[in-house]
Image (cartoon, coloured by chain):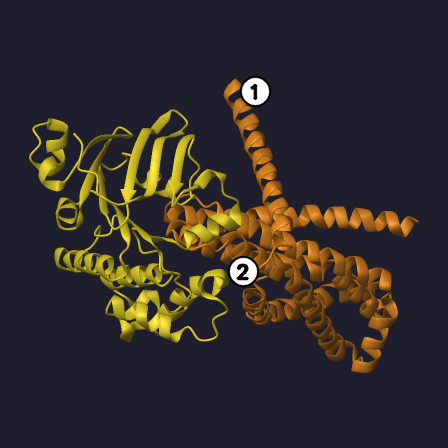
Amino acid sequence: MTATVPNSKPIIEIKDLRKSYGDNHVLNGFNMVLYEGENLVIMGKSGSGKSVMIKCLVGLERPDSGSIMVMGKNISELNRSSLDELRTEIGFLFQGSALYDSMTVRENLEFPLRRHTKKFGVLKDTTALVMEALESVGLVHAINLMPAELSGGMKRRIALARTLILQPKVILYDEPTTGLDPITAKEILILMKSIQQKYNTSSLIITHDVDCARVISNRMILLVDGINYAEGTFAELSTSTDPKVQAFFK
Amino acid sequence: MMPMNAVFKIIGIIKSFLLEIGELSFFAGRFFRESFRRPMEFKEFLRQCYNMGNRSLLLVAVTGFIIGLVFTLQSRPTLQEFGAVSWMPSMVSISIIREIGPIITALICAGRIGSGIGAELGSMRVTEQIDAMEVSGTNPFKYLVVTRIMATTFMLPILVFFGDAISLFGSYLVENVKGHVSFLLYFNQVFNALEFGDLIPATIKTFFFGFAIGLVGCFKGYYCKKGTAGVGLAANSAVVFTSMLLFIIDFIAVFVTDIFYDL
């Protein structure tokens, strides 16, 4: 099953990605292309290797074999400083938000900003950039709060603002709606869509939430046993007669 | 005859201990490599110095004061028996400066600072904050580990000096009450008994103590296994491992100092 390839250039290309932990073969030759401006959803059961794949993509995990090209650069061939530079173009929204709990919301947002003088120059006052990012997620009033004072949905929004502040070209979402109530989850999805339109980013979304996939995806890949088992639009996959594909939509 | 299971268990424990020593050595090597790389994270280093130094002052002061009091109270009757009570300030100063002050302060800091670092970095690892730092293009090892190890290395000698001074003051109070010794006479005898040969090795070893506290705390926290239980284990094992390491360093320091004295 194949989907229509969007008419734009690839921003991320993964070829024959393999990763094992001892005898546990998590990824067995995974392939993927993410195009500019596209929302690609990767669905899979728990333990199917979704998170491992996304961690390989940003260099948090080292793959056993295969190639990962991000904006034309091979991740495994980059040295530390080149990788850090490339990482400013890749936003990552963690499942648990991963806000620095010893810092206020403002400091959380300033933290990555002050470290990338190549991209942003030496910033004396970051207020404008911080406020812009917080406005995008509708949480300007939370600027001086500590992460412990925020609700789950607010944490997710602030984490998204922290991702946006580096003005990335691509955003990776690891289970963006997991652990949220249906209303907050819907709000996050709307926010993700509006951000994509406003900043013209590409998005790679890892999820097992069918509603999330239906609302946000341009294209989907189903990850089964470490390989891309099926690929297509939500409409194509949800009407598939393949029992393994159907299992995701029941 | 020992059952085979027990033998395998002992071999397993030794093997895992040696593996841990090996991993800790690699971690220390990485610390030295990263220490000289830019950016220097000076602001975070100062923040850690403040956290570790300032917030440990009261604990070190109270403990040091009690040690000075108790040590003098316990030793006095014995010295009195031999008519050597006038040697009290000399004996107390040499014991505290050379050995008791550094090791007790280091053990207190291992409990307070080492476990704190283990728990803090452990919880950051478990909640993916370290990964978040990494993907935002910040080197978490440099920001979190290098600054903390440097802070413990430089703050422990200061805390030891402070603890020693408070201990001697505690000892003076006992001497003043029991033996009517004046402040000037007591501290005159204290400083007359001390030589640079007492101060320098004692000070040098406190840098190693501080380094060990920071290194083990960071190592245990940074490589904490998933889950809240892992955080508790990281904090606990940081204290146990550091305490053991402190005594080993102390033994080596005394041994080396002894060789220099013989020369």
The N terminus of chain A lies in quadrant: top left
The mark lying in front, picked from 1 and 2, is: 2
Placement of B182 over or under B28, stated as above or below: below
> Of callouts 1 and 2, which one flags the residue occurring earlier in the amino acid sequence?
1
Placement of B69 over or under B22, stated as above or below: below
Q: Is residue A67 left or right of residue B31?
A: left
Q: Is residue B228 left or right of residue B259?
A: left
Q: Give residue B10's position: percent from left, percent from top.
A: 56, 28
Classify mark 1: residues with Cα within 10 Å, few (<14), some (14-19) or many (20+): few
Q: Residue at x 75, y 79 (%)?
A: B176
Give the labeled residue for mark 2.
B112
**Residue A153 visible here:** yes
Label 2 residue SS = helix
Label 1 residue SS = loop
* Mark 2 belongs to chain: B
Q: Amino acid at mark 1?
A: Met
Chain drawn in yellow: A
Chain drawn in orange: B
Q: Residue at x 36, y 70 (%)?
A: A130
Q: Residue at x 21, y 52 (%)?
A: A177
Q: Give residue B150's position: percent from left, percent from top.
A: 62, 59
Give the labeled residue for mark 1.
B2
Classify mark 2: residues with Cα within 10 Å, few (<14), some (14-19) or many (20+): some
